[in-house]
Structure formats: structure tokens, C-alpha cells
Image: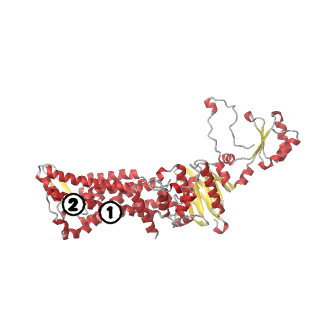
Amino acid sequence: MTSSSSGVALATQGLAKRYGSRVALDGLDLRVPEGVVYGFLGPNGAGKTTTMRILTGLIRPDAGQVELLGRPFGRRDRRRLFDVGALIESPAFYPFLSGRENLRALAATGAPVPATRVDELLELVNLRERAGDKVSGYSLGMKQRLGIAAALLSDPRLLLLDEPANGLDPAGIVGMRDTLRALAAAGKTVFVSSHILSEVQQLVDVVGIIARGRLVREGPVEDLLREAGSIRIRVAPDEVAGAAAALGPIAAGAAVTPGSGPEAGWLTVRIDPARGAEVNRTLAGAGIYASRLETGTTLEGLFLELTGSHPDVTDAAALGTDATAAPQATGWRS
Amino acid sequence: MAVVRLLVANLRKLVRRPASWVTLVLLLALLALIFVALIAAARTSPEPEAALGARLFVTFPGAYELVLTMILSIGGLLAVTYGAAIGGSEWGWGTLKAAVARGESRSRYTLLNYAAVAVFTWLGLLCAFVLGVVGAAAGAAFLGVGLAGMTDPDGLRELPELLGRAGLALAMNAAFGYAVATLARSQLAGIAVGVGLFFAEGIAGLFLPQVFQWFPFSASSAVTSPLSGAQVGGAGGGATVVTQLDPNTAVLAVTAWLVVALVVAAGFTERAEVGG
């Protein structure tokens, strides 16, 4: 595998894990560069938390290798975790202790922690005023913030966060995002798994998408979005064929897909969303004028496509509802 | 240094833990209740044997050992539940997960967590012993028994050894509950199984005393007992055999069980997959 001099904070090779007959990981190959925020995405049951547990020594893989901060990590290498901070699944605290006492108790484990660190972190996650209250009285968001503080106790070089935004209100999510970006800017590596794709899109530099225990796509988020980008144009129904023909040359082999049914009059062109002006100019040159033009793709669309996931949509026919109603909002920007 | 740091942190946790105080208060309350019942029975019962038995309980220096025997019988079960509660909660609340993810040694964490339990068990024993002695002295005053034996040199000389033996026995009971809860990964299951085994051993010992005298709870109740050998009695078709290890052999057996319980707890934690 790699050495620390190559700037890889976390790497796995052929990671496999099985629970009975169920395959949780099926040869996972990850490569997380140092100093980035890496978004680890996947549908439920894809293997994200299993991966996190292996990376923190909670469980052992059936096969494969792990490198943390350039050095092999195995059963006898628990001290590697002194430079790693983690929040795995739900944060774990003693309900009868206060937030401050919980952090102090945790600080007694693993790597030594300076005495002032606890209060610094409580300030960072905006829990200083409630630090003396028992954790049993904390909301989910407060526990999550305390969990992030716990992960930062040893000032780790690598941070592993499993659904860190869970339970946070919008202000908390923004605060978490700013904190994680600041940590990456300071040279730390942040490895985040999340289901909130819109939030991940704003936060991460690199994305790894896992499905059925394997990595299906990995790369800088901008590159992935550009590859999967689309432009949607609305024209008069009788001009769809003409518009498709006009756009064919600039699409350069990419799909130009006319819509049907509720999507009649819409054309979708799979090209870089930044070329919206060029598309508009091309249509105007052909005497066709679009009434609407929408650009971009969300990480959500790419995610659904790569993982083969389906949105959780009720079967309208089974309920006898009108299946020709207006399409659901897609989050596209006009 | 890391060991001291972790041990101190565990002790601080247990000070704040409600289970520590509930268990102690329960032990003290039950002990007090026994003395109250003893004295009341002695003063009101028409049976001369009842009065004689009560007077024996409050006559020093023998009262020291009898108080410890009472503490071992009540406190033994409470120590099992206390150990189970502390050990199992680390799995149930996920706090073991947090420590392991920080690179802490699993076995060291488990053993130092237990060490704090043992310290609190001994502190509970001391508190209960003090209360028991006060209760015995009060009982002696009520029943008109002299207190000269309280300062008997031979009795006082034996006290540290008796307290040490009782402390060892209670620590083993706590370790047993701790180990069971660790295997069950649950404080509730650990308490239930620990209590069940406690009573099951007692019942089984009625039928196979020669075998079960070696088992943990039977051995722990024998560490301070002056009785040894077997006593056979009964008429007709029935015979009752009461068999108990001699105190020194009981100490060895209890020590062995303590080691086994800790090895099981630490070994299991070292190898187990730690979930959320």
C-alpha cells in the first residue's frame, strides 16, 4: 500500500466483512488524501458504518488491509488511533454525568489530553452553558455536538464522523460545516459519512460512493458533478424534435433525451452545466427559443444513479391516485 | 500513569453513579433491619432460645465475625448485582465503544473499570461493618449485654484478617456479576443471570453439598466462618448434610474464582466485536 510521504491519510485495500450469510463489505478500496474533507456516501446497508467500525478497531475485517496516516492498522495497532478521532453511530455517554464530566472521563482513555482541552471543545461546539447539566437531559442535537467534541479531544490528524449532522438544527449544521472546513484547512483530514447529500455537496472536497459493500465511484466532487451534469430546456412541444437535432452536435455524443407525459416539452442534455449559455445560443441560432433553462445536477441524482437506489415513493397506481399529476419538485435551479 | 489516570476517572464515575449509593443504602438498610428485628424478637419472644441467639449476636468480640457473616450473606448478592450493573452498562451505553475507538486497551479498560468496582465494594463493606458494629453495640445496650469484649485484644487482632477475607469474597462476587454482564453485553441480563446463579447455586448445594461447596457463592460465604467439617442430623428417612469449606480453603477457592471471572471478562472484551 502507500507510505505517509504520499499524502494519503486513510487507505483500504480489499476490505471484506461478512455477517453470517450477509456480505457487508465486498472488497472495499478507499483512498483518502490528507487535508481534505472526504464524503463517504451510500444507501442504508451499503457498508458505511461497518467500514467506520473497522477503521476504529471496533470490529475486525475478514480480509483486506487498512492504513491509517500512512501506517498499517491491525489488531495490535491500537495506538495508531491516538491520532484519530471518531464519532461512530450514535454518541455514547454516561447519562448520569454532565457533558463536561463525560468528556473528562473519556479524556482519561487513549492518548493523554491537556486539562484545558475539554473547556475549549465545549466552547467550540457551543455547549459551554450546558456543560454542567447531565447528559440525560440533552437533546439529540446537543449529544451530537458533544460527540463531535469528544472526537476532537486528542486534536486528531484524522477525523472519522458517522452522520455528524444527525439531529442538528440548521444553525448547528452550518456551525459543524464551518468547523470541519476549518479543520481541513488546518491540515487535518475529515472523513464523513452522511445521508444529507445536499449538505455533503457543500462540505466535501472528495466523494466516495459505496454500494453493496464496494466503492462504485470516487473522486473530487466537482469532477463527479461535471461528469454527471445535465441541462434541461423547455420548448414548445412541436419544436422538441428540432431542438434535439440542433443540440445533437454540441452534445457530442451525449444523450439528448426528450421528456414524455408530464415531462413533454422538456429536453435533457447530458453536458457540463456551465455550457448553458452555449446551449441557449445554439437553440436561438436554430430559431428555437426556450421558455425555461435549468442547469446543474445534485449529488443526490448522481448518488441514486450509481447506487441503484430508488426514492421512497408510494405506488400511486396501487392507491388509485392520479398518476398524471404534476411531477415532484426535483431541486433543480432555473 | 495511564493506569492511574484511568483508575481515578473510573472512581470518579462511580461516585456519581446512582447505583453505587442505592446499593450501599440498601445494604445498610437491610443490615439495620436485621438488628432491629433481632433485638425486638429478643425482647418480645417467649422463646428463651431467641433471646440467647440475639445475645450471641451482640456479644463482642464474636459479634465482629457475626456482623461480617451477615454482611457477606446480604452483601454478596448486592455485590453481584452491582458488578453486573457497572460491567453491563459499558456495553449497553456504548461507552466501551468510545474508549476503544480512542485506542484504549480493551482488557486494561475492563480490568480498571472492575478495579473501581472492587474499591467501592470494599468501601461499602467498611461502611456496613461500622454500621453493624454500632448496631451490635446498640443491641447489646438494649439487651443488657456488656461491651467489654469490644476492646478484646485477640478480637481486634483478628479484625484486619477478617475484613480482608470478607473484602476478597465480596470482590469476587462483584467480579462474577461483572463477568456475566460482560458476556451478556447488558447490565439487565447480567443482573438477572447473576442473581439466578446465586440462588441456583444455593439450592443445588442442598442436594450436592460436597460439589457445590467449591462453587463461588458457597465458597465466599465460608471465608470467615469458624465452622468446618460436616454435620449430619435428622431422623426417619431424612438426613441433612451441611458441608462447608474451611476458611483457608475457601479463600483459595474464592481467589481462583476471582481470577477466572476477571480473565473471562477481559478476554471476552479483548476479542469481541464492539457494536454501537
Q: Are marks 1 and 2 in contact (CB under 8 Å)?
A: no
Instruction: Return the residue nearer the eye: B257 or A326.
Output: A326
Q: Which residue is mark 1?
A: B122
First reached walking from the N terminus: tag 1 or tag 2: 2
| Residue A328 shows in the view | yes
* Residue A24 coordinates in the image, percent (x, y): 57, 52
Q: Secondary structure at mark 2?
A: helix
**What mark, if any, has residue A301 been given in the picture?**
none
On screen, residue B51 versus residue A206, left or right, reads left
The quadrant of the picture occupied by the N terminus of chain A is: bottom right
The colour scheme used to paint the residues is secondary structure
* Amino acid type shown at disc 2: Leu
Label 1 sits on what residue type?
Trp
Q: At 22% from the left edge and 70% from the top edge, which residue is drawn?
A: B157
Residue extending furthest toward the front: A129
Badge 1 crowding class, 10 Å Cα cut-off, few under 14, some 14 to 19, many 20 or more, is: some
Q: Is residue B224 left or right of residue A224?
A: left
Percent x, y of residue B200: 30, 51
Percent from the top left, x then y, of residue A15? 59, 58
The numbered dot on residue B66 is 2
Which SS class for mark 1?
helix
Spot occupied by residue B143 in the image (x, y as percentages of width and height): 15, 56
Cα–Cα span, label 1 and label 2: 18 Å
Q: Quadrant of the C terminus of chain A?
A: top right
Of residues A174 and A251, which is closer to you in this image?
A174
- Residue at horizontal 85 percent and vertical 45 percent from the top: A281
Q: Are marks 1 and 2 on the same chain?
A: yes
Q: Which residue corresponds to the image point at 48% horizontal and 50% vertical from the top-left?
A: A137
Q: Is residue A140 above or below residue A327?
A: below
What is the chain letter for disc 1? B
Task: Classify mark 2: residues with Cα within 10 Å, few (<14), some (14-19) or many (20+).
Answer: many
